Amino acid sequence: MNLVKFSDWISKALMILAAAWTVAISVLVLANIIGRGAFDFPIHGTAEMVAASIVIIVFLQVGYAIRSRSMLKADFLVTRFPSGVQRVLLAVGYLLGVAFFLMIITGGWQESIASFVEGEFEGEGALRVPSWPARWTVLLGSALAMINYGVMAYLDIFRPELLDSEVPEDSIPGAPGP
């Protein structure tokens, strides 16, 4: 399996996991609201679980957002440039994306390790939620984002599909002749 297909598969799988997690959190919030209003029986720790889950959901989806070209970009000016200039600007944008997520990883690496080793928790009172799953999801999501920016750079700048389509069929071994 090549890197592009692997990246796509992982990105889609994490996006599906994030969607399922979002549904579960929505059900939890709804149950908490109904429990509070109708039965005077709240689900303790809902706020803490939702707060931790938001970060996890976002970073589970970031790789898919990049790969599906859903990340925010303002290309209203770039599209007016010639193809060569557009490719250079794409390369700069992808490098900036890689640099951004690399800074997140380098800035959060030590805290993530410490959070796991020391058993750090968030929240007070009814429920204390461990911090390390959110911290490690940020790191893993950022690593996948870097990989996906690399994949996008490869596909958009080098355009391998164009290279494959430019090769005449009769020069491909085993291809049917004219």
Image: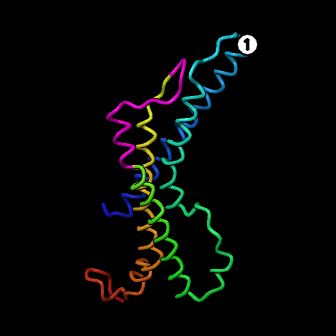
Any magenta on residue 124? yes
Q: Where is residue 38 in the image (x, y as percent from the top left)?
A: 73, 13
Q: Is residue 53 above or below residue 87?
A: above
Q: What residue is drawn where x is 39% and y is 81%?
A: 164
Query: x, y percentage for residue 56?
Result: 50, 42
Left-right relation of 68 to 142 = right
Query: Residue pushed farthest left?
Result: 173
The vertical placement of 112 against 99, above or below, is above
Quadrant where the image shows the C terminus: bottom left
Give me the residue at 32% from left, 82% from top: 176
Q: Circle 1 sits in a helix, a strand or a loop, which is it?
A: helix
Q: Which quadrant would residue 103 be assigned to in this image?
A: bottom left
The residue range painted magenta reads: 109-127
Viewer-nearest residue: 91 or 161: 91
The residue sitting at 53% across, 27% down in the picture is 123
Under mark 1, the amino acid is Ala
Q: Above or below — where is 76 with respect to 169?
A: above
Taking 119 as reference, is 45 left or right? right
The x and y percentages for residue 54 are: 56, 40
Q: Toward which corner of the image does residue 135 lie, by quadrant?
A: top left
Colour setup of the view: rainbow
Q: Quadrant of the N terminus?
A: bottom left
Above/below status of 67 relative to 129 = below
Q: Which residue is label 1 attached to?
A: 38
CA neighbours of label 1 inside 10 A, class few (<14), some (14 to 19), many (20+): few
The stretch drawn in magenta includes residue 129 = no
Which is more toward the observer, 60 or 121? 121
- Residue 37: quadrant of the picture: top right
In this orientation, which residue lies closer to the viewer: 36 or 48? 48
